[in-house]
Amino acid sequence: MKPKKTILCVDDNDQLLSIRKVILETRGYRVVTAASAREALEVFKAGVVDLVLTDLVMPEVDGTELIDKIKAISPETPAILFSGKIRIYERDTRADVFLPKGMYAPAELLERIRLLLVRKRGPKRVMRATTAHPQIGAAAS
């Protein structure tokens, strides 16, 4: 069995954080949650995180700053930034994807996560079937 991918989910809204956690866990992801950017940074530094999903607007440190700090530590870690207050985000950001809250279906979020994790991992290598036993059949002659 392949190991579960770990997603760090960050939001200061506990209810939305819980909903996202349930959605992601039912799809087989391991989810670690944080209610602030400071807490998220501690969690990120302490363990293996495959993807970061963070709210934009949070007290003290916003999602853009959090992603900048995470990308400084691990540039290859994919990050999704979302917001319920902003529909189009035009500021320069190191986030791989921006999603406005409530403007996408859970299936779209799951597909974006899947694609970012595939991109991080790289394409699967196709194993070619080789003739392991060329002698079979030759023994009868």
Image (spheres, rainbow, N blue to C red):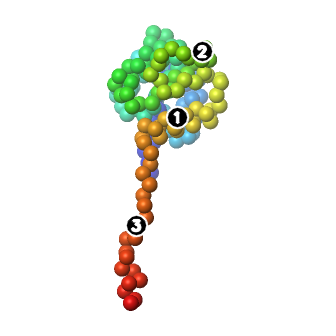
The answer to whether 65 is drawn above or below residue 138 in the figure is above
Q: How far across and how far down the image is residue 38, in percent? A: 41, 17
Q: Residue 42, can we see it?
A: no
Question: Residue at (40%, 70%) from the top-left corner?
Answer: 131
Q: How far across and how far down the image is residue 39, in percent? A: 41, 20
Q: Mark 2: which amino acid?
A: Ile
Of marks 2 and 1, which one's residue comes earlier in the chain?
2
Q: How far across and how far down the image is residue 19, in percent? A: 59, 28
Of marks 2 and 3, which one's residue comes earlier in the chain?
2
Question: Residue at (57%, 37%) from the top-left corner?
Answer: 111
Tell me whether the residue at label 2 lies in contact with that at label 3, contact meaning CB atoms closer than 8 angstroms: no
Of marks 3 and 1, which one's residue comes earlier in the chain?
1
The residue indicated by pointer 2 is 86
Question: Residue at (36%, 28%) from the top-left corner?
Answer: 74
Q: Nearer the viewer, residue 26 or 108?
A: 108
- At label 2, counting other C-alpha atoms closer than 10 Å, the crowd grade (few under 14, some 14-19, many 20 or more) is few
Question: Residue at (57%, 29%) from the top-left corner?
Answer: 20
For marks 2 and 3, give the CA distance: 54 Å
Number of labelled discs?
3
For marks 2 and 1, give the CA distance: 21 Å
Q: How far across and how far down the image is residue 82, in percent? A: 55, 22
Depth-wise, is mark 2 or mark 3 nearer the camera?
3
Q: Nearer the viewer, residue 2 or 129?
A: 129
The residue indicated by pointer 1 is 113
Q: Which mark is residue 50?
A: none
Q: Mark 3: which amino acid?
A: Thr
